[in-house]
Image (cartoon, rainbow, N blue to C red):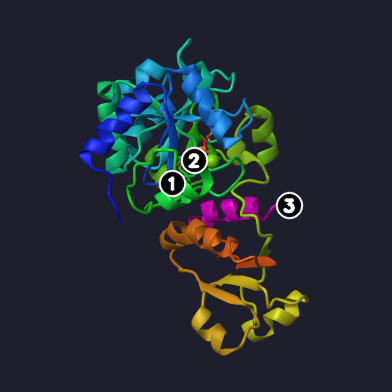
Amino acid sequence: MPEASDQNIVNAARAIERGELVAFPTETVYGLGADAENADAVAKIFALKGRPQDHPVIVHITDATQLSHWAREVPAFAHELIKHFWPGPLTLVLNKQPGVADACTGGQGTIGLRCPAHPVALALLREFKQGQGGIAAPSANKFGKLSPTTAQHVRESFGETLPILDGGACEVGIESTIVDGSRPELGAVLLRPGMLSVAALRAVLGATPLLLPDDINDRANPRVSGALPAHYQPDTPLRLLLNADVIYSKLAVTIGSNVSNSALLCFDASAKSTLDSGFRVLRPMSGEPALYAQHLYANLRELDKLGLDCIYIELPPLTPEWLAIHDRLKRAAHR
Ligand code: TXA
Ligand code: MG
């Protein structure tokens, strides 16, 4: 796997300073980066992604010393979360300083801030504007599609002309946990679950973060694309199998349609393949949430190229450590 060299990183920082776009790895997914304080550069992100203008983008920063440049109000609980989880897969939505990075906020008074844990991302942030800048970066995919977890995924969406820092495959594999700290009277509000779990947040907060139902969240935060019912989607229709303990030999019958051109993402493929399930592809998935998340999007992208009628997914257990994965599966399957 070609790793971005120091010179690649310096060149990328200079390109972003000139107002160009560069894709870069984070520990969650690859981002499509631009100078957060250059409105023309940020506009290029929206144009390339085909993203609605009023959806805000996350600003990536070097470390917590940069917070006060962007956020005007940081509640004590947000400081605690930052102390424990930055650099890491946690984005905080905070009330923003007036006049900064308006192009990144979709017209809202809040800003999403994150310090990523990937060494290439951190080196890029330290090099860009000598560590004092912010890099606006949504996931490097077309709007509504699956986030990329390798440099090759980014190339498949945007071609060879977009510069990409290659940092190998992303370790986390799905997007960061987003906590809203802009309404301190509500405490911490979970806007998007991620692999930084509710249990981990609770351990620091001393309380469970508020999880608003999507419809209320949409009204309070109308421009959170990650909260749209259809998001993170492959082109192939995706169907979730609710009965976790399906009898695999009978599954094709249970589904009631011809599955000879379909795939099944399942937890125990060895047992199933011997049972002649009738599926064209059986894709074994890990029973460990962290490993499942790491490989989920890469698997869906690979299966998406096969011209399948449908991708069936055996739902993981309905337990808290699978919350973020359930969230992505639900949105990916929404039609
Ligand atoms: O892991 C991640 O968060 C990746 C990597 C590249 O950092 N980024 C990512 O960005 O997933 P994106 O734009 O695809 O999703 C960010 C989500 C969107 O749903 C966006 O609407 C929301 O964060 N968001 C950003 N700023 C916000 C704000 N000020 N208020 C509410 N939501 C915000
Ligand atoms: Mg995205």
Q: Earlier in the sequence, mark 1 or mark 2?
A: 1
Seen from this angle, which residue lies furthest top? 99
Which quadrant holds residue 216? Answer: top right
Instruction: Decide if residue 321 is on the left or right side of residue 47.
Output: left
Amino acid type of the residue that numbered disc 1 sits on in the rendered structure: Val
Amino acid type of the residue that numbered disc 3 sits on in the rendered structure: Arg
Tell whether label 2 touches label 1 (CB within 8 Å). Answer: yes
- Tag shown at residue 146: none
Does the magenta-highlighted stretch encompass residue 20?
no
Which residue is identified by label 2? 139
Disc 2 CB within 8 Å of nearest ligand 2 atom: yes
Seen from this angle, which residue lies furthest right? 256
Amino acid type of the residue that numbered disc 2 sits on in the rendered structure: Ser
Q: Secondary structure at mark 3?
A: loop
- Tag shown at residue 335: 3
Q: Secondary structure at mark 2?
A: loop
The residue lying at 49 percent from left, 44 percent from top is 159
The residue lying at 63 percent from left, 83 percent from top is 277
State whether residue 285 is above or below residue 168: below
Instruction: Decide if residue 255 is on the left or right side of residue 64.
Output: right
The boundaries of the magenta stretch are 320-335
Which residue is identified by label 1? 29
- Horizontal and vertical percent for residue 105? 54, 22
Which quadrant holds residue 275? Answer: bottom right
Q: Tell me if I can see residue 56 in this picture.
A: yes
Disc 1 CB within 8 Å of nearest ligand 1 atom: yes
Name the one closer to the observer, 17 or 320. Answer: 17
